[in-house]
């Protein structure tokens, strides 16, 4: 099972920022309800979010 916790999401975003990127991706869980909930939560944090067939894309300015 894929770790979809907000701690993991935050760590992925922080790592991307440290690497000088303005985006990050996380694997989808395989459960559309979970993926939508994660995307909505990330969106509520002020990030832009898109879901493609393989992953959730997160971007910021």
Image: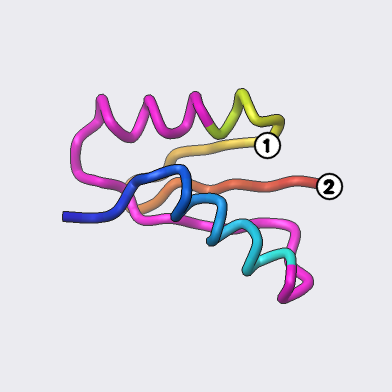
State the extent of the magenta-drawn residues as a range: 18-41
N-terminal-most mark, 2 or 1: 1
Q: Residue 28 at what x, y percent from top left?
A: 31, 48
> Callout 1: few (<14), some (14-19), or many (20+) C-alpha neighbours within 10 Å?
some
Rounded to the nearest whole Å, what is the CA distance between mark 2 and mark 1? Answer: 9 Å
Q: Secondary structure under badge 1?
A: loop
Instruction: Look at 55% across and 34% down and name the residue there.
Output: 42
Q: Which mark is residue 47?
A: 1
Instruction: Look at 25% across and 46% down and name the residue there.
Output: 29
Q: Residue 48 at what x, y percent from top left?
A: 66, 36
Q: Is residue 40 magenta?
A: yes
Instruction: Look at 72% across and 76% down and name the residue there.
Output: 19
What is the total number of numbered labels drawn onto the structure image?
2
Q: Is residue 39 magenta?
A: yes
Q: Is residue 60 left or right of residue 41?
A: right
Q: Residue 40 at what x, y percent from top left?
A: 49, 24
């Amino acid at each position: 099972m894929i770790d979809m916790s907000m701690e993991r999401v935050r760590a992925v975003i922080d790592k991307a920022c440290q690497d000088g990127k303005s985006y990050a991706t996380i694997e989808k869980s395989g459960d559309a309800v979970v993926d939508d909930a994660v995307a909505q939560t990330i969106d509520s944090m002020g990030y832009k979010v898109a879901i493609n067939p393989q992953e959730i894309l997160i971007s910021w300015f």
